[in-house]
Amino acid sequence: MKNNINPAAIQSLWQTIKENRGTVIMLLLIAAAVIVLLTGCDANAGSTMALATVIAGTDGGSHVVDGPITTDTVRQSGSELLLNEIDRRIVKIRPMATPIDQISRYARPRHSKSMIVDYYMVDTKPTACRLATAYSPSKEGTEAQRVTIKTDNDDMLAVSDTLMLPEVPGYEADGSTQSSKSLVLYVVAKDDSGITVMAINGSKLGSTADCVPALPLNTPIIRMGRAAAELDVQTPQFESLPQKAQNYCQIFKMQVEQSTLMKIADKEVEWTLSDQEEAAIYDMRLGMEKSFLFGTKKQIYDYRKKENVMLTEGIWHQAGKDFSYDPDTFDQDTLISLMRTAFTGNAGSKRKVLVGGSALIETINKLDYTKVVNARDTVTRWGIDFTEICSKFGRLYVLLSEVFDECGMDTAGMIIDPAYLQKYSHLPFGSEALDLKSAGLRNTDATVLTEAACLVLRYPKAHVRITPE
């Protein structure tokens, strides 16, 4: 094939491009934009194509389909995988020394638009009461089948409730032989005089079957499920009223400065403002840990600053349960009783955290564990190394907190349910550089660390204070 390319024409075209480079570049950009528009790849379409689809898993997880995992995808899924840089730095600074503050930072804090935080707590309806007056059967017939009793908490019972009396044996079908099953009652009516009940597996009195047997004073009564008839459409109402509580966000601050001469001076080891900031953050977190634990809620007026100062309430005062122990007789039975108190009667988690002073941790550490209660190897949660104690009630993550020692409470401790530990943040933890040179104050580089926050226990009964007798 004959070559028809004219070298002189190519040379002329190249010379023209060199002389009009600006115009040529502009024409190329316009052409590229036209191609993008014609192919439909606008900015919105491109961003839509880049984002993958996030679908829910079978057990609360998230899965990415039709695309790669990106930071936008992770944030779209609501995952807490990505942390802000300031938080990432803070949680790595000696986390073992401030476990409460550390755990609260791993949970997603709730933003508060006010320094005063109002929140609501919902408790569970009681499930147990006791007989307030003893009952002895004295008559036959329906009067022995439908009996009115009084309990120490009639309000927790409703018509159609079934009640189990674990300390009172029921009867077999003949009504004369005691059964291995506990006595079960059915609530027929309720009024000011008491609770009218029928026996499900009662005794035979004369010729009358299913009579309520004798019931001693203080007999435990357990509320079970309701039993409705076939034609029942309605049932006694159940409403839960949340209880309002309040806490104050406290403004925590720490300032770090370094003079210009100190900055430029030769040093035997490298010691910069960033190193001072790390030490300041650690000291600041120690102070916050004490306030978050033992602080007293109060608003005071500083007459020198002419301003109000808000102090936060510590979670030690918010806990809904107490457990006292004798340090001289603390044994495995005491530990089991402690775990029973922590894990029962509150519908909380089966994994909780125990932080305590050195004397309490020493006492627990001296115990001889069995197969029923055993201390496992170290487990890491929230960036903290815990010792795990397992029992039939649940698992405790145990950690020494020297904050208790510093506050004169080395024999005390606290069991916390992390699922119900909530942090409210009015000002997230951050740093701000101060220009003191331009202000004519000092020839220094200065940084101020600030956070305004508080901790609350959303379900007080899930948390336990541990104190010596």
Image: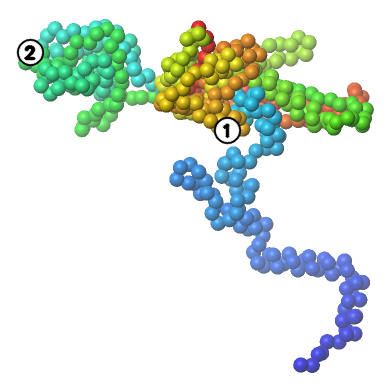
CB contact under 8 Å: marks 1 and 2: no
Query: In front: 223, or 260?
Result: 260
Please tell me which of labels 1 and 2 falls first in the chain: 2
Instruction: Label 1: state its secondary structure.
Output: strand
Residue type at mark 2 is Gly
Q: CA distance from mark 1 to mark 2?
A: 66 Å
Q: Where is the N terminus found, in terms of image quarters?
A: bottom right
Label 2 packing within 10 angstroms: few (<14), some (14-19), many (20+): few
Query: In front: 232, or 126?
Result: 126
Instruction: Label 2: state its secondary structure.
Output: loop
For the point 18% across and 21% down, the residue is 179
Image height of 113 relative to 12, above or below:
above
For the point 86% across and 68% down, the residue is 23
For the point 66% across and 62% down, the residue is 41
Work out which residue is located at the far bottom of the displayed protein and give it.
2
- To which residue does mark 1 refer? 380
Image quarter of residue 261: top right
Which numbered dot is residue 206?
A: 2
Is 449 positioned to the left or the right of 243 in the image?
right
Is 174 positioned to the left or the right of 247 in the image?
left
Q: Position of residue 220 (x, y in %)?
A: 30, 14
Label 1 packing within 10 angstroms: few (<14), some (14-19), many (20+): few
Image quarter of residue 309: top right
Q: Position of residue 45 (x, y in %)?
A: 63, 58
For the point 82% across and 66% down, the residue is 26
